[in-house]
Image (tube, helix red, strand yellow):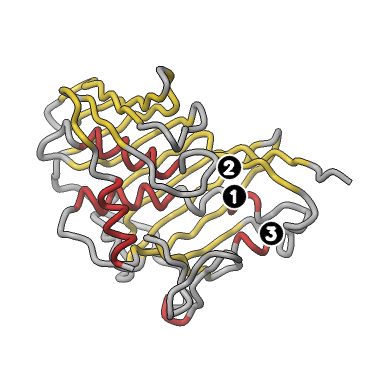
Amino acid sequence: MQAEVDALIELLDLEPIEKDIFRGVSPQEDRQRVFGGQVAGQALVAATRTVEDRSVHSLQAYFIRPGDVEAPLVYLVERVRDGRSFTTRRVTAIQHGQPIFAMSASFHKEEEGFEHQTDLPAGIPDPEELEPFVWDGFPVDDQGRMIRPIELRYVTGSPAERGQSREPRLQVWLRATGTLPENPVLHTCMFTYASDMTVLDTATKALPVRGNEIDIQAASLDHAMWFHRPLRMDDWIFLDQVSNSASNARGLAWGTAWNRTGELVASVVQEGLIRPLRKQP
């Protein structure tokens, strides 16, 4: 599925309009609103293009309004600070004259320091031992994989099993379904894109009703990420996700990501709207 991956690479390649102003578009897909991971990934691309010789180590973002899939997205980058070790950028995504997304990102020059990490959970099956995740009705290739740029293989259940298990935990292997160029920024931005695909599902998995008994309005509200070590999206990344709270129509979940060799590469936290919508009789 290299074509789908190439299309995602192109989606993340923003058009420069003016100094610190970039334009992005949405793919031609049947969506009611712009996918949050797309906006986050594109915003990080915009911020990165104003920084030299430093890598992003953290970002905090808010989804303010639903994005219009038919309209281009304009990204305005504010150069908040260029320090000796750290650089800070603020990015606002604009559509129809209004902000739909805001992000602050911090970049750090490479330097030596102390190291420790949480180990990859023991006993996790390799991704090759697991079946590709497929939503009903989505087209698949000859290997039974959804024709998408990101492949998911769940270890502990899946979003489709909502209401069958009350444990608010999801473990999943993910990767791009094709090869990527040797560009560390692209790998980081693509992981940012993919990070919005599964985290909030962890909170909805613990709902006390099965998926066909109630409709849910779910949407990302805020998103935070920390990048600990370099990562590659054309190899498998294991994401262990846990939700410790859902209340007041919101759910909070976080995830910890390791590569196949057991290096902890990133952490992600997301709060999202989980609003029950009772089906009409």
Disc assigned to residue 162: 3
Frontmost residue, 186 versus 127: 186
Circle 3 crowding by C-alpha within 10 Å: few under 14, some 14–19, many from 20? many
Cα separation, mark 3 vs mark 1, equals 14 Å
The image shows residue 204 at horizontal and vertical percentages of 65, 51
Cα separation, mark 1 vs mark 2, equals 6 Å
Q: Verify CB contact (< 8 Å) between mark 3 and mark 1.
A: no
Q: Amino acid at mark 3?
A: Arg
Q: Secondary structure at mark 3?
A: loop
Residue 12 in the image: above or below residue 178: above
At horizontal 69% and vertical 54% (from top left) the residue drawn is 206
Disc assigned to residue 137: none
The residue carrying mark 2 is 252
Foreground tag (3 vs 1): 3
The image shows residue 196 at horizontal and vertical percentages of 46, 47
Circle 1 crowding by C-alpha within 10 Å: few under 14, some 14–19, many from 20? many
Quadrant occupied by the N terminus: bottom left
At horizontal 49% and vertical 34% (from top left) the residue drawn is 222
The residue carrying mark 1 is 243
Residue 27 in the image: above or below residue 258: above
Frontmost residue, 186 versus 173: 186
Q: Is residue 33 left or right of residue 215?
A: left
Q: Earlier in the sequence, mark 3 or mark 1?
A: 3
Q: Earlier in the sequence, mark 1 or mark 2?
A: 1
Residue 6 location, quadrant: bottom left
